[in-house]
Amino acid sequence: MQDAPAIAAAELGNWAVAWAAAFAAGSIPFGLLMGRLKGIDIREHGSKNIGATNVGRVLGRNWGLTCFALDFLKGALPVMVAASWLIPDWPTGARAMLADAPPATLDALSRWWPLTAVAAVLGHVLSPWVGFRGGKGVATSFGALCAMWPLLTLPVLAAFTVWVVAVAITRYVSLGSILAAVALPPALIAHLAMHTTLAPFAPVLIGTFALSVLVVWKHRANISRLLAGTENRIGSRTAATPRHSGR
């Protein structure tokens, strides 16, 4: 039989594989690929971002929605696969995990699993396929965190509600994203406080706060435009000219 350290090392090795796979999935630049299908480099148009908002503004609403769905999935699927593979009794016993999880499961929930979500988001934000200058991470973060049932699904949906209200009132997608990121950590704290003690989930809280800071930081140019009154609202459209070879 394997001794405890060997088992722990094997489990950590499995998690390392999950993190690497999540980063690889997150790094797929769907926005850039969609632009190339239309004969343009999306990084040369609109806000020059490869995320769903700019794709929708440059290529049209349907392309933007498709990009959002794909960016959502590349965050959600690695998190769900990792949990199914490495967390016992997930998702059937997920509700009981917050209060009554065995130590090994609690360790996976609170420490190793959140790093899978972080890896997927970092893959998107620091994609090696686009010179480590990827998107802003909103859709990928939304997918990755929504998939973390039962830890983060409800807090993320609460943050999404903030996004919907903010965008409906202001018509600024960027402002909604910033406010949703700011709302997520307190929503998580409230959710955990209603079901369990916070101390074992300190790594989740720290990781969620770090992701929120990352999303806000990636929106620093939008913040400047919001303050200057030059940020694009929903409904604005930037025309893109396809590349042509020759004259």
Image: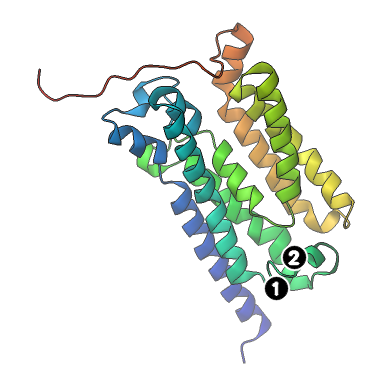
Is 109 or 160 nearer to us in this picture? 160
Rendered location of residue 232, percent (x, y): 53, 15
Question: Residue at the location (49% across, 15% down)?
Answer: 236
Vertical side of 95 occupied by 159: above or below: above
Question: Residue at the location (67% across, 17% down)?
Answer: 170
Vertical side of 225 occupied by 13: above or below: below
Vertical side of 217 occupied by 237: above or below: above
Res. 140 mark:
none
The outermost residue toward the left is 246
Mark 1 / mark 2, whichever is N-terminal: 1
Question: Residue at the location (67% across, 37% down)?
Answer: 212
Rendered location of residue 15, percent (x, y): 57, 65
Q: Which residue is mark 2?
A: 94
Please state if 197 lies on the left or on the right of 116 as rendered.
right
Is 103 or 30 nearer to us in this picture? 30
Which amino acid type corresponds to the residue marked 2 in the rendered image? Ala
SS at circle 1? loop
Report if the CB atoms under discs 1 and 2 are less than 8 Å apart: yes
Q: Is residue 2 visible?
A: yes
SS at circle 2? helix
Quadrant containing the C terminus is: top left
Q: Is residue 51 visible?
A: no
Rendered location of residue 47, percent (x, y): 45, 21
State the CA–CA distance, disc 1 to disc 2. 7 Å
The outermost residue toward the front is 62
Which amino acid type corresponds to the residue marked 1 in the rendered image? Asp
Rendered location of residue 91, percent (x, y): 68, 66
Q: Colour scheme in the image?
A: rainbow
Is 126 or 228 nearer to us in this picture? 228
Vertical side of 136 occupied by 79: above or below: below
Q: Which residue is mark 1?
A: 89
